[in-house]
Image: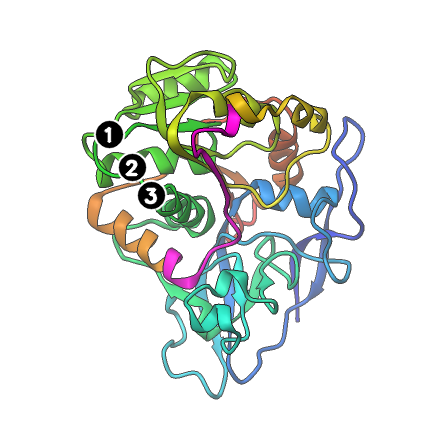
Amino acid sequence: MTMRAMLVREPAPYSSNMSPLELAEVAVPSVGHEDLLVRVSVCGVCRTDLDVVEGRLTAPRYPVIPGHQVIGRVAAVGSEVSDFRDGDRVGIAWINSADGVCRWCRAGLENLCPQFRSTGCDVNGGYADYAVVPAAFAYAIPDALTDAEAAPLLCAGAIGWRSLRLARLSDGQRLGLAGFGASAHLVLQLARRRYPTSPIYVFARNPEERAFAIELGAAWAGDTSDVPPEQLDAVIDTTPAWKPIIDVLPHLAPGGRLVINAIRKSSTDQNELLHLDYASHLWMEREIKSVANVTREDVRQTLTAASETGLRPTVEILPLRLANQALARLSGASRLRGAMVLDVAGRE
């Protein structure tokens, strides 16, 4: 039995005459004793998918199927699985497995596990008709969420949730967001619900993104080079570049924290780091904290928060065959409003 899949045969950058993803017919994956076979309904499009396709993240083997914001229905259940049944609606996130025994896993930090395996990079992901996941790393999807609404929550939402926790904000403190794509538009909504008296200041490249931020409740929106009305207690950076970091660090209040929500940063503007100045960027006990992956608990809490508070991603839905165009838009300067989601089951 075969299925459609978008394959990365070897990493390559997007250009006007190159589409690195290839639509192909491949075998439906087999199911292990502890696994679920999931018939994919939709799969969210993430900048990390772009990192895999263009080679900033290297898969252990090729070809590989990207995609790690997967919603679908259980099509087959491994013999040792008792928590799921055929037809259950489930999600598959970036964390595909961890060893469960290392000191990080025992401390609830499975995102730091040396044996951490990622969906859509270490193992095949959801840009395909079917995907396999260990049942222990699958998520029941709340009825309140549609497939397209739930998909971005599995990564853009969950990594935003983790970033917000690592920012260590208190209600009333000032939060900055550098970049305003799929993750940041969810962080803003999460922050407004969690810290209702905290003003949120958004730094974004283009007027459409800034207008969208104001529409969602930002107190102020400007370019990354603009000066916000007041100093910030925390900033979450969701951009692929270094320049926004250099731009926003001087706006951190004493004791403030910058949280960088990115697995990889582009090397094209790495010389910007030469402008890092201790006195104006880091002194006064300012901190820089990176975010590495997500835990299963991050995903569960994000899904619960969205279901209970009415948080909904803004999504644009495209057919699977347009996955190259979707990722090309992420690689360029295209203006995006929220998240993109691939309709896999529609077979358009």
Depicted 235 relative to depicted 139: above or below: above
Give whichever of discs 2 and 3 has the lower sequence position: 3
- Quadrant location of the N terminus in the rendered image: bottom right
Q: Which residue: 33% across, 52% down?
A: 302
Q: Which residue: 55% across, 75% down?
A: 99
In the image: residue 247, left or right of residue 304: right
Residue sitting nearer the eye, 195 or 255: 255
293 part of magenta stretch: yes
Instruction: Please state which amino acid type lies under the numbered disc 1.
Output: Ser
Tell me the residue that label 1 is attached to.
198
Tell me the residue that label 3 is attached to.
168
69 part of magenta stretch: no
Instruction: Please state which amino acid type lies under the numbered disc 3.
Output: Arg
Point out which mark residue 191 bears: 2
Which type of secondary structure does the marked residue at label 1 adopt?
A: loop
Q: Which residue: 53% across, 56% down?
A: 94
Point out which mark residue 8 bears: none
- Neighbor class of circle 2 (other Cα within 10 Å; few <14, some 14-19, many 20+) is many
